[in-house]
Image (spheres, rainbow, N blue to C red):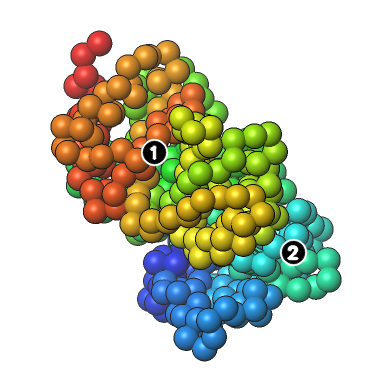
């Protein structure tokens, strides 16, 4: 079997843990499997490097910032390979440029374009365990890029897809995907099996246990993903294609995201072409707009509200302020203290009334809804950030996620 494993920051957080990971990998080798490992930087390292840069200058140059933060994974991959070699298991650490893992030039949020498999396959055939530095890539020019926070998940799934691995195991500090973040909902339950679609929505809505693009890759290339703990041998959560055996529940999980900010534009001319003149430049700046609401006003103008990642908040405000005079926007306002809570479930497709119930639960707890967005299998509400935990716990209980599915009567 060919297995791609990814170990997150906590799992390689200190030398003892690196040894623990090495022992786990050795066990797979003893069982006769080929193993490609993707590692994150040691816990806290990426944050430390980012802080260095931002303490030094206000706006670090993106190219150099990537060169800096990519070093975290160089350290952990080298250490893990050393540990394995010392145990008598031939292992080789590889950086993105040595494979290569080619990306576009969007520093800080680069997209993988191509992964060459020649060297990986040759080394595997020689009996090496390959330890790949996650999170990083290389452009055609030879510049180092990074894939965005949590990007090692994406490296792992993309390599699994490129090599046609039998499974991609994501080892982390929780033992699977839960019905909500177990750190804020103590009653959250582990989900045994979840569909790519639902996982994609949960990840997109903020459940950081898997990075969004890793789920996109898994879904497109049909890579079975197993999310599990690096501290136990218990099975975790399988992320696979939707099938009959999946839990027949209305709502599978609740997610929250505190990393977005809201921007409102008041008194925008209500005529064709305006939205593209506003959102065109924002998109060109590489800023991903999430929710957008436009409302007409009696005076023939419109108000527009949208959300962007908090990290892009200032840049977006600057952009729209520059656009304001030529477009004729009357007033611009922003709010960083918001959160988006979402309920996700394939069962929603067939059931009306889920949204109404969500709004009722929030109302019962005195939580005001600022924005709403829906898809076939998800409903999201933007609320004040201070109510995040209350909202997530209340929704978790109201939709019966505290109880095991067997206890539910149909
Ligand atoms: P790693 O460093 O291993 O990549 P992350 O911190 O990125 O780990 O992701 C794991 C964390 O995701 C967990 O510690 C947990 O707090 C959080 N999380 C959020 N939502 C969920 C969920 N629905 N199920 C499991 N974990 C979740
Ligand atoms: N080290 C990177 C981060 O902290 C990538 C990862 O851990 O997946 O975001
Ligand atoms: Mg992660």
- Tell me the element at label 1: strand
Looking at the image, residue 397 lies above or below residue 108: above
Give the label, 2 or 1, closer to the camera.
1
Q: Report the residue marked by disc 1.
A: 371
Q: Position of residue 152 (x, y in %)?
A: 56, 60
SS for callout 2: loop
Q: Quick one: quadrant of the N terminus?
A: top right
Counting from the top left corner in percent of width and height, residue 61 is at: 64, 78
- In this image, 287 relative to 401: left or right? right
Residue located 24% across and 53% down the image: 386
Circle 2: is it few (<14), some (14-19), or many (20+) Cα within 10 Å?
many
Tally of numbered discs: 2
Position in image of residue 134 (x %, y %): 59, 64
Q: Which residue is mark 2?
A: 105
- Quarter of the picture holding the C terminus: top left
Residue at 22%, 40% (x, y): give it: 367
- Asked whether residue 57 is in view, the answer is yes
Circle 1 crowding by C-alpha within 10 Å: few under 14, some 14–19, many from 20 = some
Residue in view at x 41 percent, y 74 percent: 44
State if disc 1 and disc 2 touch (CB < 8 Å).
no
List x then y, in percent, for residue 238.
46, 38
Compared to 238, does 73 lie above or below? below
Left or right: 178, with 167 as reference point: left
Can see residue 122?
A: no
Q: Quadrant of residue 318?
A: bottom right
Spatial separation of the CA atoms under disc 2 and disc 1: 33 Å
């Amino acid at each position: 079997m060919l297995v791609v494993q990814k170990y997150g920051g906590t799992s390689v957080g200190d030398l003892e843990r690196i040894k623990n990971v090495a022992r786990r990998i050795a066990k797979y080798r003893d069982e006769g499997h080929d193993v490609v490992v993707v590692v994150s930087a040691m816990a806290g390292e990426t944050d430390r490097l980012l802080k260095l840069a931002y303490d030094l200058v206000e706006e670090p140059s993106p190219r150099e910032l990537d060169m800096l933060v990519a070093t975290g994974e160089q350290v952990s991959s080298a250490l893990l390979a050393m540990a394995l070699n010392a145990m008598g298991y031939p292992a080789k650490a590889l950086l993105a440029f040595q494979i290569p893992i080619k990306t576009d030039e969007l520093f800080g949020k680069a997209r993988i374009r191509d992964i060459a498999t020649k060297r990986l396959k040759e080394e595997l055939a020689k009996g090496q365990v390959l330890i790949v530095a996650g999170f990083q890539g290389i452009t055609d020019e030879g510049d180092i890029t990074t894939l965005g926070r949590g990007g090692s998940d994406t490296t792992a799934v993309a390599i699994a897809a490129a090599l046609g691995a039998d499974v991609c195991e994501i080892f982390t500090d929780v033992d699977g995907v839960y019905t909500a973040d177990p750190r804020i909902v103590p009653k959250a339950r582990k989900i045994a099996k979840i569909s790519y679609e639902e996982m994609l929505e949960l990840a997109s809505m903020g459940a950081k246990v898997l990075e969004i693009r890793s789920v996109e890759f898994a879904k497109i290339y049909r890579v079975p993903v197993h999310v599990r703990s690096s501290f136990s041998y218990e099975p975790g959560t399988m992320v696979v294609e939707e099938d009959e055996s999946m839990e027949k529940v209305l709502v599978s999980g609740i997610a929250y995201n505190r990393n977005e900010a809201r921007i409102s534009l008041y008194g925008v001319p209500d005529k064709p072409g305006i939205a593209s003149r506003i959102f065109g430049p924002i998109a060109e700046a590489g800023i991903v707009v999430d929710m957008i609401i436009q409302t007409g006003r009696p005076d023939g103008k419109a108000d527009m509200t949208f959300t962007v990642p908090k990290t892009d908040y200032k840049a977006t405000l600057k952009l729209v302020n520059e656009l304001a005079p030529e477009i004729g926007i009357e007033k611009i306002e922003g709010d960083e203290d918001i959160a988006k809570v979402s309920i996700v479930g394939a069962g929603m497709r067939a059931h009306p009334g889920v949204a109404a119930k969500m709004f009722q639960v929030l109302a019962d707890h005195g939580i005001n809804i600022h924005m709403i967005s829906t898809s076939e299998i998800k409903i999201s509400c933007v609320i004040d950030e201070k109510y995040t935990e209350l909202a997530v716990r209340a929704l978790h209980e109201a939709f019966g996620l505290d109880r095991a599915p067997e206890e539910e009567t149909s």
